[in-house]
Image (spheres, helix red, strand yellow):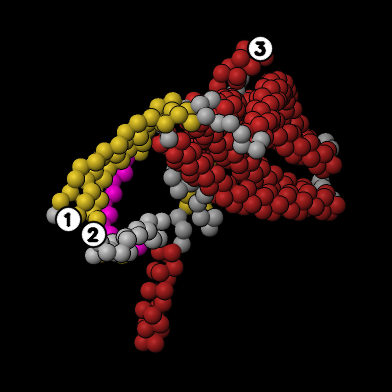
Amino acid sequence: MRSSYFAVLFCLPVVAQQLETRPAVLQLSLKKAVEIALSPEGSTRLQLAQESLKQTEARKDEARSSLLPDFEGQISEKNMDENLRALGLRFVIPAGFGFSIPTFVQPFSILDVRASVNQNVFDFSSIRRFQSAKATVGAARSDLNDTRDRVMDQVARSYLTALRAQTTVETAKANVQLSEALVKLAQSQKNAGTGTGIEVTRAKVQLANDEQNLLVAETDQTRSNLQLLKVLGVRIDNAVELTDRMEYTPSDTLDAEHALKAALDKRPDLKAQQAREVSAQFSYSSVKFERLPSVVGFADYGSIGSTSSLLPTREFGLSLRVPIFDGGRRDAERAESASQLRQERIKTADLRDQIELDVRTAIVSLKSADAQVKTAREGLQLAEEEVSHARRRYEAGITNSIEVTDAQTRLDRARENVISALYNHNLARIDLASAMGRIETVVQ
C-alpha cells in the first residue's frame, strides 16, 4: 500500500508537466486568423515585403544625397624635408662667391585645418534618379499592400478549406448516426419476424462505408488544419477549433463594367505596376539627361602653416562639366533603360487585361455558385423527406431495407452537394473580392 502511495506521488509531477506543455486549443474565426497572419510575427511573405520597402526607402535616401551639400572637415599635420633636385631645382654658384645653396631643406612641420563643401547646382540627371527612386518607393508600398491582400486571400482560402473539412466531418458523423439507427431498426425488424438477416447485413455494410468515410474526412480535416497553421505562421502542433460556420450569404448583383472600374481603382498590384512604369520613365530620363552639362559649386576654408603661425586660406568657385565622349556607355544605358520602360508598359497593359479576366470570371462563378446552393438545398430537403418516408414504410413492413438504403445513399450525396455548393459560393466571393481589391471587406 505504501509503495503504491509513493508511486502516485512520483507520477504527479510528470503528469503536471505534460499538462503544462500540452498546447491549448486555438480557437479561430476568419477575422482572428487574418489578424494573426498580418501580425509582425505572422506571414513570412508580409515580413519580406516590409523588408523590401525598407530597402527601397534606403535607396531613395541614397539617390537624394547627390542633391544635398557634401560637407567635409579635415585636419592634417605632416613633418617633411625636401630635396630641391627632386623638384627640378638646381642652383650653380660660381666659384669665388663664398657660399652655396644647400640641396636639402631642413625638416619642417605643416598643419592644415580645413572645411570644404560641394553642391550640385545644375544636374538634371541626378534629379531624375531621385524621382525614379521615389516612384520605386511608391511601388514598394503598393507591393506591401498587395502582399497584405494576397496574405488575406490565402488565409481566407485556407480557412475555407479547413471549414469545409470540418463540415464534412460533421456530415460524416451524422451519416454514421443515421446508419447506426438503421442497423438497430433492421435488427429490431428481424427480431420481430418482419425482417431478414440480409437486411441487417446490408445496414451494417452501409454503416461500415460511412465509418470509412468518417476516417477519411477526419484525416482531411487534420491536413487542412495543419496547412492553415502554416499559412498563419504559428506552431503547427496547436490544436485548432474553427468558430465560424460555412454559411450562405446572398450576393448583390454586380455589373461587370462597374466591378471592373472599381477593380482598376483599388487593386494595389496595378498601382504598384503603374509606379514601376513611372520609375522606369524617370530612369530613362536620367540617362538621357546625362548628356547635358552639369554645374557643381565648391568651397573650402581653413588655416595652414606651422603650429606657431597659421595663415587663413580659402577657395570657392563653380565647375562646369560637359560630357564629350564616353566610349558609347551612355548610348548603351539609354537603349537598356528604353527597353525596360517598354517592358513595364507591356506588363501594365497585360495586368489590366488580367484584372478584367479575373473580375468577369469571378462574377460568372458567383452567379453559378448562387444557383448551385439553391439547387443543392432543394435536393437535400427532398432527400431528407425521402429517407423519412422510406423509414416509415420500412417500419410499417410495407417495403424492405433496399428502399431505405437507396434513400440513405441519395441523402449522403445531397449533403455532399450542399457542402460543395457552399464551398464554391464562398470561394467565388473570395475570388470576386480579391479581383476587385476588396478582400479585406470579406474577411472582416
User: Is tag 3's residue or tag 1's residue first in the polypeptide sequence?
Assistant: 3
Q: Position of residue 201 (x, y in %)?
A: 82, 53
Task: Classify 10 Å Cα crowding around label 1: few (below 14), some (14-19), many (20 and above).
Answer: few
| Horizontal side of residue 25 vs 436, given as left or right | left
In this view of the protein, can residue 8 be seen by the observer?
Answer: yes
Q: Residue 353 carries which label?
A: none
| Pointers 2 and 1 in contact (C-beta within 8 Å) | yes
* Residue topped by disc 1: 307
Q: What element carries label 2?
A: strand
> Mark 3 = which residue?
257
- Give the magenta part as a residue range: 71-83
- Of helix, strand and loop, which one carries label 1? loop
Q: Badge 3 local density, few (<14 within 10 Å), some, or many (20+)?
A: few
86 relative to 222 in the view: left or right: left
Mark 2 vs 3, N-terminal side: 2
Q: Relative to residue 248, is residue 241 depicted above or below?
A: below
Which residue is located at x 36 percent, y 78 percent?
9
Kindly indicate the quadrant of the structure image that contains residue 246: top right
Residue 332 counted in the magenta span: no
Q: Which of 147 and 252 is in front in this view?
A: 147
Where residue 232 sits: x, y (%)? 53, 46
- Work out how far the residue at label 2 is from the one at label 1, CA to CA, in angstroms: 8 Å
Q: Which amino acid does label 3 sit on?
A: Glu
Q: Sort mark 2 into few (<14), some (14-19) or many (20+) by Cα contacts within 10 Å.
A: few
Residue tagged 2: 109
Magenta stretch, main secondary structure class:
strand
Whole-angstrom CA distance, mark 3 to mark 1, is 82 Å
- Of residues 398 and 111, the one nearer the viewer is 111
